[in-house]
Amino acid sequence: MSGHSKWSSIKHKKGAADAKRGQLFTKLARAITIAAREGGGDPDGNPALATAIQKARAQSMPKANIEKAIDRGTGEGDDAVVVERIQFEGYGPGGAAILVDALTDNRNRTSAEVRHAFTKHNGSLGEPGSVAWMFETYGVVVVDGESNSEDDLMGAIDAGASDVLEEDGKLRVLAEPTDLTAVRQAIESDGIEIESAGLEVIPKNTVEIEESDAGTLIKLLEAIEDQDDVNEVHANFDIPEEILEKLA
């Protein structure tokens, strides 16, 4: 298991976010609405909703917008729109597996836009199930690795955490999605400050991408994420840091 998505790391380092704040808020609100519809409006009992709310708060989405999106998902809103979740699977340059999570009110439009992005950047869409098996969903709690050690997280292990990984100065505590709340509460009760907690889709293994394919792959992922209806993009690639520096 890789432990983290290289694409998530690249986006974080580049400060990649939607150019238009309105577009960003629309995506965040859709994610909250779908999570509330599928798992209820209480984030303590709905890890997917807790994750969506956390992402919204990180982007300074107003509390009223978050509450409105939750109400819309639980059927209490007065402006309900039928939004559905669609998953696309495909491959990018260098053989990277790509999993696309979209939230849309127009399946045909979204399918056409995602397909166009794949085709334009030397990728290809696959059949349902073609790459999804290469990824797993985990509950992930991140704490500072400088002021904490794995020994400090024994309470999290007792609460159901399955692994602790050290990456980029952080400790990432992994658990089954259903154990995320208990693990988060155990860490908090031990007086450890949590930097983030939520659900993550993590590749089981990674494919190293050659320099000749790296630039096109990054452009493909950016083109997919730029689509209004795309909520999350996951990929199982690894690009050496020296190549990433050339692309920066």
Image (spheres, rainbow, N blue to C red):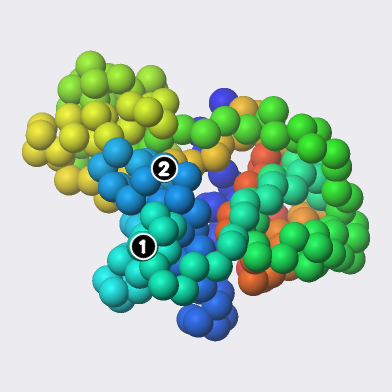
Q: Residue at x 17, y 45 (%)?
A: 193
- Residue 42 is situated, as x and y percent measured from the top left of the image, at 28, 47
- Residue 204 is situated, as x and y percent measured from the top left of the image, at 62, 28
Name the residue beneath numbered marker 2: 39
Q: Quadrant of the N terminus?
A: top right
In the image shown, does 66 or 172 lie closer to the viewer?
66
Q: Residue at x 63, y 47 (%)?
A: 234
Query: Does residue 18 appear left or right of residue 235 in this picture?
Result: left
Q: Between tags 2 and 1, which lies in front?
A: 1
Q: Quadrant of the C terminus?
A: bottom right
Name the residue beneath numbered marker 1: 76
In the image shown, does 22 or 187 lie closer to the viewer?
22
- Which type of secondary structure does the marked residue at label 1 adopt? loop
Q: Residue at x 17, y 30 (%)?
A: 186
* Number of residues whose C-alpha sits closer than 10 Å to that of mark 1, classed few (under 14), some (14–19) or many (20 or more): few
- Residue 28 is situated, as x and y percent measured from the top left of the image, at 47, 65
Mark 2 touches mark 1? (CB < 8 Å): no
Residue type at mark 1: give it.
Glu
Whether residue 234 appears in this view of the structure is yes
Task: Please determine whether, in this image, residue 165 is positioned above or below residue 217.
Answer: above
**Quadrant position of residue 52:** bottom left
- Which type of secondary structure does the marked residue at label 2 adopt? helix
Q: Earlier in the sequence, mark 2 or mark 1?
A: 2
- Residue 32 is situated, as x and y percent measured from the top left of the image, at 43, 58
**Quadrant position of residue 157:** top left
Query: Does residue 240 appear left or right of residue 215 in this picture?
Result: left
Residue type at mark 2: give it.
Gly
* Number of residues whose C-alpha sits closer than 10 Å to that of mark 2, classed few (under 14), some (14–19) or many (20 or more): some
Whether residue 15 appears in this view of the structure is no
